[in-house]
Amino acid sequence: MELNHIDFIIISIFFLSMIIIGVYAYFKNKSSEDFFVAGGDLPWWLSGISHHVSGYSGAVFVAYAALAYTYGFSLYVWWAFTIGIAVIGTAKIFPVYWVRLRKKFKIQSPLEYLAIRYNVFTQQLIAWVGVILKLFDVGAKWAAIAILLNVTTGISFAHGILISGGVSLIYITIGGLWAVILTDLAQFLVQLIAGIIMFVLVLSRFGGWDSVFGIWDKLPAGNSQLFNAPYTAGFAVVFLFINFLSYNGGSWPLATRYISSNTEGEASKAAYLSGILYLVWPLILFFPMWAAPLILPEMEDPSGSYGLLIQELLPNGLIGLVIASLFANTMSMTSSDVNTISAVITRDILPVISDKFRNKKTSLFTARITTFIFTSLTIVIAFQYEYFGGVLGLIVTWFGALLGPIAVPLLFGLIPVFRSCGPMAAISSVLAGLIAFSITKIIPVDSMALEVGMPVIVSMFVYAAFGLILKKPVSREVIDLEAAIADK
């Protein structure tokens, strides 16, 4: 498909605005604390919007568009609904804990407290596993946007990765978290406008508001069901637990949104805002994808359905806006990931490797170099995505399955009932989860719920079991940590 000059102008303005925001944010960074946690001064509404849009990427419009086309409404149930419930249900717990950790222990990375809670070796194990995992996760997201751009504009796969990755590389490196947050806001507004336009156009095509419920009779019977195999009720329960871990801080960038909040109340309000958006906005955003089989019947590869919908429904000019929103979704999530992973490398890994990285005077320079190198590596991984099961394989299977081993000791370490779970419990849970993941890759598993959920379940079971079996005395440091986050 050929874009006209209006489309290119809109896309160019979008990219230029991202770089301008990055330059503006550059002057807000005086230290690594500003670069990684916005100086702990993030307003709740900015934090909430950023927490929300950080959960999207171009993969939503590639991998998830394919699932919406093939399996229908069940996508909302196991993905968006479970996230909303997980975030709202814990809004007064984990967001509060993260703020207290920053205020009382001066953390800038979600993993910094692990050295106190367990020991340095445990912290390093979780840090290294998580960093490697995120290399593949972010790489998959660059690949997703490149595939979508190829379908909608004809831009080559390589150029799509280099454009989106290159612009992100610039503004994240110079602007840090402030750049990420401010571009998240701009990207959310672009996503909102583009999503509403697509929603209204699809409604108009099928006769107005009645089509919100009317299209389902024309679709395959399973598409209107809450659960549609292999995305069964069991899979939804597994994903609810995965999302509980991920959106409360197991996904480190999402923990950073809470860590960066000014007060505990602001962090809780941010969680409520993000959770409500997850319950409402995907119903509008996914509607065109659910209706796609009626507009584009019998597609052999539904992963390109959203891109073809853009071509089918939109005039030139609006196409540029929607394409800009696709860039926005991916760049929002990936920039959040990169900023937080850079914090982990700078704050948790490098100081253990060499004392020279403990120098506060050079911490901001180190943060920028780390950000640049990590982002560059994710772009390299993006070119190799097919070797890891494609976009859906990387995001749903790899990330969902491997999240548990690194998130269980991170989050459960904050819960008083697990206070007796020490370093051995944490290390064992990580290793057991990784072994379980390897087994699911070697031995075919018929149930997707079991394939994705086994590493998480194994990690949780091993963590709790070791704590109960070993029953080692709780150290003074852990007691003090527990008292601090309980605000006693």
Image (cartoon, rainbow, N blue to C red):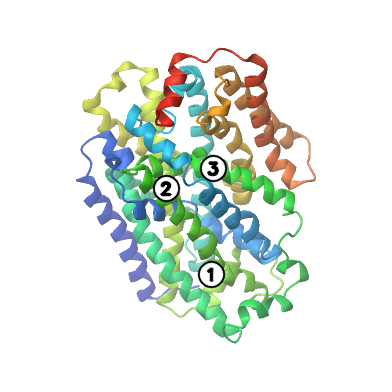
* Residue at the image point whose x is 60% and y is 21% from the top: 425
As rendered, which of 351 and 313 lies closer to the eye?
351
Drawn side of residue 3 relative to residue 122, left or right: left
Seen at 71% across and 37% down, the residue is: 454
| CA–CA distance in space, label 2 to label 3 | 16 Å
Q: Which residue is mark 1?
A: 284
Q: Answer with mark 3 or mark 1, whichever residue precedes in sequence.
A: 3
Residue nearest the observer in this picture, 480 or 446:
480
In the rendered image, which residue does mark 3 sit on? 246
Classify 10 Å Cα crowding around label 3: few (below 14), some (14-19), many (20 and above): many
- Where residue 313 sits in the image (x, y, percent)? 53, 79
Type of the residue with mark 3: Ser
What is the three-letter code of the residue carrying label 1?
Ile
Q: Which residue is mark 2?
A: 268
Q: Quadrant of the C terminus?
A: top left
Question: In this image, 434 relative to 332: left or right?
Answer: right
Q: CA distance from mark 3 to mark 1?
A: 24 Å
Q: Secondary structure at mark 2?
A: helix
